[in-house]
Amino acid sequence: MARSLAALLLLLLVGTVASGYQYEEGSVGRTFFLQHDLYPGSNMTLHFTRAAPGAPSLPRARADAIPFTSAKIPEILSLFSIPAGSPAAAAVRSTLAECEAPRFPGVAAQRCATSFESMVDFAASSLGTRGIRAGMTKLSREGATPRQAYVVESVVPLPVIGRDMVACHCMPYPYAVFGCHTTTAAVFTKLGVTPGTVAVCHFLPQDGKLWMRK
């Protein structure tokens, strides 16, 4: 039986976001659908993966003093006492490779921010103002949620000044790193669960942030 889930879910239009960031298999970030599918009473099967305890966030001065390049991987692994052949080391290599990759087609600006301050600065610079706010996906229930069917209770578009926004996603690393990119996606408030978008879209995972003008 489909469950109703009271939640604030932010939606991204993949067609315009063109994000290269990867999400956990089966998570809401990997579930794609169309806007016309998003309406009260519609339903879909989703898996809300809980954001794991985040890596420590470093002050910008500390983060900027640490090498953040594939050329210094041995030094980085040594600094954080990470065994070279471990899954954690593979995550470091993967994140650095993704951060150093060419900008994804259709994305005006893209950056990996190694501190909260640098993430805010990137968002403000991209949006052309320091007057910005961040939206996040929030669930009303605590604890793990299995992959199951949900039904949408309501859909309320959020007003976004200028339509352009900056999406930031947490990336696997010894400390907090945010993969950020510009987007002109539409954003919706949803109480419950389910589809939506003229282009292809997906929900913003719980550990992501969507920056927009106030």
Image (cartoon, rainbow, N blue to C red):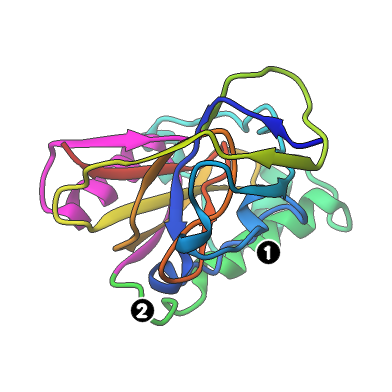
Residue with the mark numbered 1: 94
Residue 174 sits in quarter: top right
Residue 211 sits in quarter: top left
Which mark is drawn over residue 131? Answer: none
Q: Position of residue 46 (x, y in %)?
A: 71, 46
Q: Position of residue 61 (x, y in %)?
A: 36, 35
Examine the structure image and report whether residue 82 is included in the region drawn in magenta.
Answer: no
Q: Position of residue 63 (x, y in %)?
A: 45, 40
Residue with the mark numbered 2: 106
Q: Position of residue 135 (x, y in %)?
A: 37, 36
In the rendered image of this protein, does residue 141 appear above or below residue 152? above
Which residue occupies the foreground of this view, 53 or 90?
53
Badge 1 element: helix
Which residue occupies the foreground of this view, 147 or 17?
147
Of marks 2 and 1, the one in the foreground = 2
Separation (CA) of disc 2 from disc 1: 22 Å
Quarter holding the C terminus is top left
Q: Residue furthest right?
A: 85
Q: Could you tell me which residue is drawn at 38 percent across and 71 percent down?
A: 16
Q: For mark 1, does the 10 Å Cα neighbourhood hold few (<14), some (14 to 19), or many (20 or more) residues?
A: some
Q: Could you tell me which residue is drawn at 44 percent across and 73 percent down?
A: 15
Q: Amino acid at mark 1?
A: Ser
Residue 26 lies left or right of residue 190; in this view the side is right
Magenta segment: 109-137
Quarter holding the N terminus is top right
Which residue occupies the foreground of this view, 173 or 10?
10
- Residue 68 appears in the figure: no
Q: Could you tell me which residue is drawn at 65 percent across and 29 percent down?
A: 4
Q: For mark 2, does the 10 Å Cα neighbourhood hold few (<14), some (14 to 19), or many (20 or more) residues?
A: few
